[in-house]
Amino acid sequence: MNDSRTYNYLKEFTLRLQKEGKYSFVLEDLNNNFPNLNNVAFKFALNRLSKKGDIVSVRKGYYVIIPPEYAAMNILPPDLFINDLMSWLNKPYYIGLLNAAAFHGAGHQQPQEFFVITNQPALRTIHKRNIKINFLTKKKFPLIGLVKVKTDTGFAYYSSPGLTAIDLLYFANKIGGINRVVTILSELAEQIEYNELKNILKQDFPGSVLQRLGYIFEKVLLKDKLSKAIAVTLRTRNIYRVPLAGRKRKAGFKLDKKWKIIVNTIVESDL
């Protein structure tokens, strides 16, 4: 099979996948469909498709197809292929943090980066063309608080409003610090239901994260009902003094006795 014929076969293969509503493939798919494919011609065809902007390799052995409607972006939006990618990697996941907050209506602009929460071991960041996918890990992957959302290519999992709120504090240093978190929470809190949060809190989250979130709900956002759900959870746990802003100086600041929060920064929403 010569180079041109191989390219045409692969081009037709990607077009067929798109008609079936599929926008990604892996090397195993090509081996199954073209068992007699010449390796040299095969690599040439993949490189040619990539240079033309028809496909992009986002992970070794995993390719995303770029349909005409996304040609200007040079990439498919991550939410349209993340489920297939994580299934291929055999990793649990959900779209979280700023992306989940935006999905739930908190945030005035689409985040420039894409945040995916998964389990350990960690995955390398994907930085291809116009996208950056950050993979953040948790030792204990949550089973409660995931929302299955239909997409144009199937579905994807997002964190619920309650789980998103907890994660914003859990990963505060990854997304710009405590003030940015409070700004997002000021909108996101409107979407959090008491019973949903109460159910999510049955899982094991660090006490320091819950203390900060409870303090913000009560003292900053005036969401007494949501703060009560967290306070009830913390009654059964030993909690210790923690700073509101983890990376700032702790000494010489007032202690909130209820939440055992060292108030070492002034937090306020930018809205």
Image (spheres, rainbow, N blue to C red):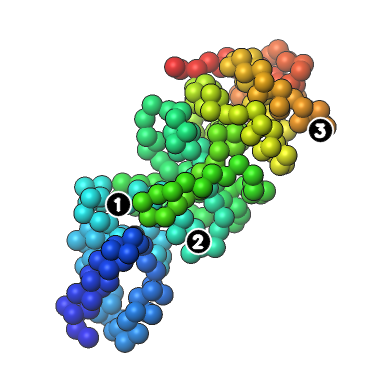
Task: Look at mark 1 in the image and give the residue it sits on.
Answer: 75
Task: Look at mark 3 in the image and give the residue it sits on.
Answer: 237
First in residue order: circle 2 vs circle 3: 2
x and y, in percent, of residue 72 in the image: 21, 47
Gap in angstroms between the C-alphas marked 2 and 3:
36 Å
Secondary structure type for disc 2: helix
Gap in angstroms between the C-alphas marked 3 and 1:
46 Å
- Report the residue at 24% width, 61% height from top: 54
Q: Is residue 46 above or below residue 212?
A: below
Which quadrant: the N terminus? Answer: bottom left
Quick one: 250 or 270, which is closer to the camera?
270
Task: Look at mark 2 in the image and give the residue it sits on.
Answer: 87
* Residue neighbourhood size for the residue with mark 1, other residues' Cα within 10 Å, grouped as few (<14), some (14–19), many (≥20): many
* Residue neighbourhood size for the residue with mark 2, other residues' Cα within 10 Å, grouped as few (<14), some (14–19), many (≥20): few
x and y, in percent, of residue 34 in the image: 32, 81
Say which quarter of the image contains residue 109. top left
First in residue order: circle 3 vs circle 1: 1
Q: Is residue 125 visible?
A: no
